[in-house]
Amino acid sequence: SGTIRTGEEIMVLPSRQTSRIKEIVTQDGNLDEAFTPQSVTLTLETEIDCSRGDMIVRPGNVPRASNSFEAMLVWMSPEPMVPGRSYLFKHTTQTVPGQIDSLRYRVDVNTLHRSPAPELQLNEIGRCSITLSQPIYYDPYRRNRSTGAFVVIDKISNITVAAGMISARELDSRQTMAPWEIDDSVQVQTDDSVRMVTGDERQARLGQKPATLLLTGLSGSGKSTIARGVERALFDAGRLCIVLDGEDLRRGLSRDLGFSAEDRSENLRRCAHAARLLNENGFLCVASLIAPSEEVREKVADLIGRDRFLVVHVDAPLDVCQQRDPRGHYQKAQQGEIPRLPGAGTAYQPPVRPDLVLRTDQSTVALCVQQVVDLLKQKKFIS
């Protein structure tokens, strides 16, 4: 699934060895990029072990690894599904023994009502807890249908008895939840005499609906300048806005992180959690980060909530960004002090469907700021 381009950094699982794509070879010649469902041969810059059944991923978007998970099962066998029985589970190119530990509930296909049930009959759907004999690498089905789907095979007859879709939450355990997930199982409890402030009350008091704008673009494109400009414009208009800048995060919350693809993903994850908390408390948030991966940006949208998440592509040519270089990152990268930057040695994926594109090499800061404010008005986050 996804897209791969020459020069991109990749990781092979389960060895976790990394390399870069040197060439994408086909019988019709080399390609600059490949995508599903093309059949290609990848040549890497360094020799690493990669055999059949291994998975090639981006270092900043590694799937989960576990031998236990929850899934929705569609039972397709005349013989009922009984928890505790062992089966074979075929996932991608692997076939692994395991068992269905429990049936949490059955779903009525007509009403979508959930009800307890001891077993699943033919064509029935239920949510189950599954344990395998060895870990697999997977994504939730809603994120990736290829790595989030599997089939269940009867060991004796070798007949497919069910199809499964892995859910986003892992066994409802806070200890096993993925970093991008939110645990909503614990609710804040207060004394009966304390009345919680509601979202509607905050909206009425502040005169704004909470939202997060992600300003994404190359280093030096003008993200931080525009973010601060938007903050000032909203403040002058009586609105409350907070800027979360990637460089500011690295001086505190993310000072343990470097500049690898995986660390950039983690920095964005932490920023997204902070933005979500700010939104839940009624604030507008402007997040200014390079955020080079489209897949990771999609995770941010899911975490914050797509109904209050906007993507602004701060677009400027690479040569313009290199001339600006306000923090000296391009120079440091050329000297080998930090890894190569997105767009200048590593991949930067422009947003596929941005809510707004700002050409900072052609527009003034004031005009860019006004366009962002107009976007907030258009989306009815402010009046």
Image (cartoon, rainbow, N blue to C red):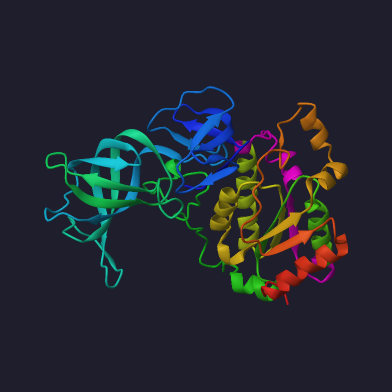
Horizontally, residue 233 falls left or right of residue 124, namely right
Residue 266 position within the rendered picture, expressed as x and y whole percent measured from the top left: 61, 41
In this rendering, is residue 208 above or below 130?
Answer: below
Farthest-out residue, front: 28
* Magenta run includes residue 250: yes
Identify the residue at horizontal 84%, vertical 47% (top origin): 320
Of the pair 337 and 48, the residue shown nearer to us: 48
Identify the residue at horizontal 60%, vertical 68% (top origin): 197
In this rendering, is residue 135 above or below 360?
Answer: above
In this rendering, is residue 52 above or below 155?
Answer: above
From this viewpoint, is residue 269 visible? yes
In this rendering, is residue 239 above or below 339?
Answer: below
Which of the 4 quarters of the picture holds residue 75?
A: bottom left
* Magenta run includes residue 28: no
Residue 259 position within the rendered picture, expressed as x and y whole percent measured from the top left: 68, 35
Horizontally, residue 103 falls left or right of residue 225, namely left
Residue 183 position within the rendered picture, expressed as x and y whole percent measured from the top left: 48, 52
Of the pair 365 and 361, the residue shown nearer to us: 361
From this viewpoint, is residue 207 visible? no
Of the pair 317 and 302, the residue shown nearer to us: 317
Q: Quadrant of the C terminus?
A: bottom right
Residue range (magenta):
234-262
Which of the 4 quarters of the picture holds residue 257?
A: top right
